Image (cartoon, helix red, strand yellow):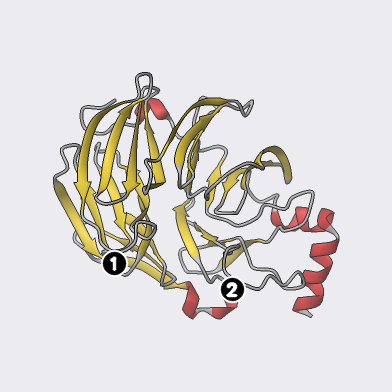
């Protein structure tokens, strides 16, 4: 019965639209072979960025309150306007990768540069000058070092050391002010209550407090009814629910895409871990592709409030 229902949803996209896209108005991006980003409103795609000449994967993206979008795409960082024109961009140095970036007002950006050595950098956008940089501990391949870094309301930054098995908080001078051991962390999002919501490649989502206590957790790979195999970023909504993105690897030779039973792109969980929304939209007119980022349209990033130590 379940496969018959999914078959119906896939080949009658208007019905799938009503079921999958109308719960939230959201901005969407993911790690696909071609750069695609979307805005969905009232159950319909109202904006679509498409770059057929792209290189690398969109690992991080954010919609800002001025309507611009900042995104890191492995081999660089780009900011575009709502008209899809490039406001500015930089390329990663040869042998390096960039998978995460955060705006600081209109004039600065802070980002992680995977490399040998790996670095955190603050760049002055108008002049492209690097105003602050410090080395980050890393090991292993450049590609596997870092994926996610997030500024906090205290002017510090939370960094997921994917290859080191830990999440660390740094001040703008590069001093470590907090850390916790986590197996293969992909993302770590600071919450309004001061806790950190961490997603690991192991499938575990956990909310931890500053004392290192786990206050909420679920392992989605160990809960097969949720059909989430590659969670990347988890977001806590204002109602207490959690949205988890589920990525599909287009590069893997072993990855099999079954159009009659496609992978979910995201799920929404209540605090008691009940699923209240499943996103599965792989057909036109709303083929959203692999999922990494979902940001609700009513919660744009206010870039004027973002700061990193003295950088505002």
Front-lying residue, 36 or 89: 89
Could you tell me which residue is drawn at 72 percent across and 53 percent down?
A: 287
Q: Which mark is residue 16?
A: none
Disc 1: CA contacts within 10 A as few (<14), some (14-19) or many (>=20): many
From the viewer's perspective, tell me whether residue 133 is left or right of residue 18. Answer: left
From the viewer's perspective, tell me whether residue 267 is left or right of residue 140. Answer: right
Residue placed farthest to the top in the image? 126
Quarter of the image with the C terminus is top left
Residue 15 image point, x, y percent = 82, 57
Residue placed farthest to the front in the image? 94
The image shows residue 73, relative to residue 1, as above or below, that is above
Q: Which residue is mark 1?
A: 182
Q: Which residue is mark 2?
A: 227
Q: Secondary structure at mark 1?
A: loop
Q: Secondary structure at mark 2?
A: loop
The image shows residue 11, relative to residue 297, as above or below, that is below
Quarter of the image with the N terminus is bottom right
Residue 197 image point, x, y percent = 36, 57
Q: Is residue 100 visible?
A: yes
Front-lying residue, 147 or 40: 147
Residue 281 image point, x, y percent = 71, 57
Could you tell me which residue is drawn at 47 percent across and 68 percent down?
A: 272
Residue 47 image point, x, y percent = 68, 36
The image shows residue 129, relative to residue 231, as above or below, that is above
Q: Is residue 191 visible?
A: no
Front-lying residue, 201 or 13: 201
Q: Name which of mark 2 and mark 1 comes first in the sequence.
A: 1
The image shows residue 32, relative to residue 226, as above or below, that is above
């Amino acid at each position: 019965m379940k496969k018959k229902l999914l078959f119906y949803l896939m080949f009658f996209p208007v019905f799938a639209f009503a079921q999958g896209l109308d719960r939230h108005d959201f901005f969407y991006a993911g790690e696909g072979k071609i750069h695609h980003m979307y805005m969905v409103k009232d159950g319909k795609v109202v904006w679509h960025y498409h770059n057929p000449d792209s290189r690398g994967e969109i690992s991080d993206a954010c919609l800002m309150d001025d309507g611009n979008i900042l995104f890191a795409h492995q081999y660089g960082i780009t900011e575009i306007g709502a008209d899809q024109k490039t406001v500015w961009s930089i390329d990663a140095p040869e042998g390096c990768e960039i998978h995460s970036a955060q705006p600081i007002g209109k004039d600065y950006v802070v980002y992680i540069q995977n490399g040998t050595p790996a670095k955190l950098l603050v760049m002055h956008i108008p002049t492209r000058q690097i105003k602050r940089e410090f080395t980050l501990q890393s090991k292993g391949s450049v590609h596997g070092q870092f994926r996610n870094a997030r500024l906090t309301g205290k002017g510090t930054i939370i960094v997921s050391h994917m290859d080191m098995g830990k999440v660390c908080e740094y001040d703008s001078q590069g001093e470590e002010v907090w850390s916790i051991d986590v197996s293969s962390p992909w993302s770590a999002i600071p919450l309004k209550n001061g806790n950190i919501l961490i997603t690991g490649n192991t499938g575990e989502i956990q909310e931890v407090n500053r004392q290192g206590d786990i206050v909420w957790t679920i392992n989605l790979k160990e809960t097969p009814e949720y059909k989430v195999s590659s969670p990347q970023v988890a977001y806590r909504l204002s109602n207490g629910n959690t949205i988890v993105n589920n990525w599909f690897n287009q590069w893997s030779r072993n990855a099999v895409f079954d159009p009659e039973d496609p992978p979910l792109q995201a799920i929404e969980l209540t605090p008691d871990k009940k699923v209240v929304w499943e996103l599965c939209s792989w057909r036109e007119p709303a083929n959203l592709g692999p999922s990494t980022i979902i940001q609700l349209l009513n919660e744009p990033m206010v870039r004027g409030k973002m700061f990193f130590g003295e950088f505002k």
